[in-house]
Amino acid sequence: MAPTEWNSVIPLEIAYDQCVTVKAVITDWGGVLTSPLAEAVGAWLAADRIDADRYRTVMRAWVDQAYDGGGPNPIHGLEDGTLDPAEFERLLAAELLTVDGGPVLAAGLISRMFGAFAPVEPMYAALRTVRSGGARTALLSNSWGNDYPRDLFDGHFDAVVISAEVGMRKPDERIFRHAVALLGLAPAECVFIDDIEHNVRAAEDLGLHAILHTASDTTIAELRGLGLHP
């Protein structure tokens, strides 16, 4: 993530399409408030000496199935809480091999996979600024059995929605409606930030304004482009 600072105070009211006033920012966690997922996964693959090509083949198939509407699979179950994280670790480890052709340790696999995640302070600073200006904020995250840094969430969010805790997952419109309802707002009054295009499109289909996150500086620029002013 680029080390961009957001130093200006942002007012509550942000005018955009059809003069609707945006009153809230809803954001993903992994890959938005953290360093990129690809970096964390790359560090884990190297540290555990896992065959990276094999991992990518397995994960690509699982991710595609989880988002194509073809029914439950390990990622779907992990995210909506119907599959125990330890079972997901076992299933994934069974599909992987080390670079020497050996087995991959299942226990603790998820923690190792995300161990290199680091908080992105410019995004946290942006949320603090938005919230201090009167807007509401919410976290909306698909959980992979993560140990969330909940101490960092204090003072940043009016609502926290973790998929496995509510039995719903993005891009299901129900979880977006749930997050919006917790804020007491209409979808059109919210901006949603995520690094996965499926989730961004689902939010837009429901009437939220949505930003596909690639880096903190570009996301902040897009927020300003919606009418955010010092």
Image (cartoon, rainbow, N blue to C red):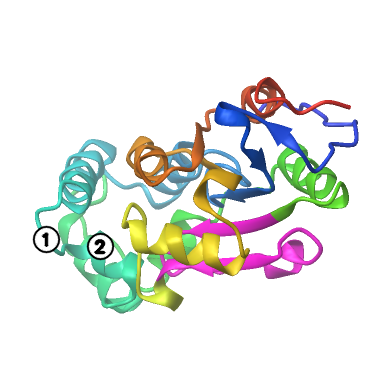
Q: Is residue 37 left or right of residue 147?
A: left
Q: Nearer the viewer, residue 132 or 188?
A: 188
Graded by Cα atoms within 10 Å as few (under 14), some (14 to 19) or many (20 or more), the crowding at tag 2 reads many
Q: Position of residue 103 (x, y in %)?
A: 22, 61
Question: Is residue 72 positioned above or below 196 on the image?
Answer: below
- Identify the residue position indicated by label 2 in the image: 76
Task: Give coordinates of residue 149: x percent, y percent.
Answer: 66, 65
Magenta stretch, residue numbers: 137-163
Label disc, if present, on residue 30 of the rendered structure: none
Q: Position of residue 17 (x, y in %)?
A: 56, 27
- Residue carrying label 1: 71
Res 90 quadrant in image = bottom left
Indicate the quadrant containing the C terminus: top left, top right, bottom left or bottom right: top right
Q: Which residue is at a point 76% across and 28% down the rendered structure image? A: 228
Residue 104 vs residue 224, the one in the foreground: 224
- Tell me the kind of residue under disc 2: His
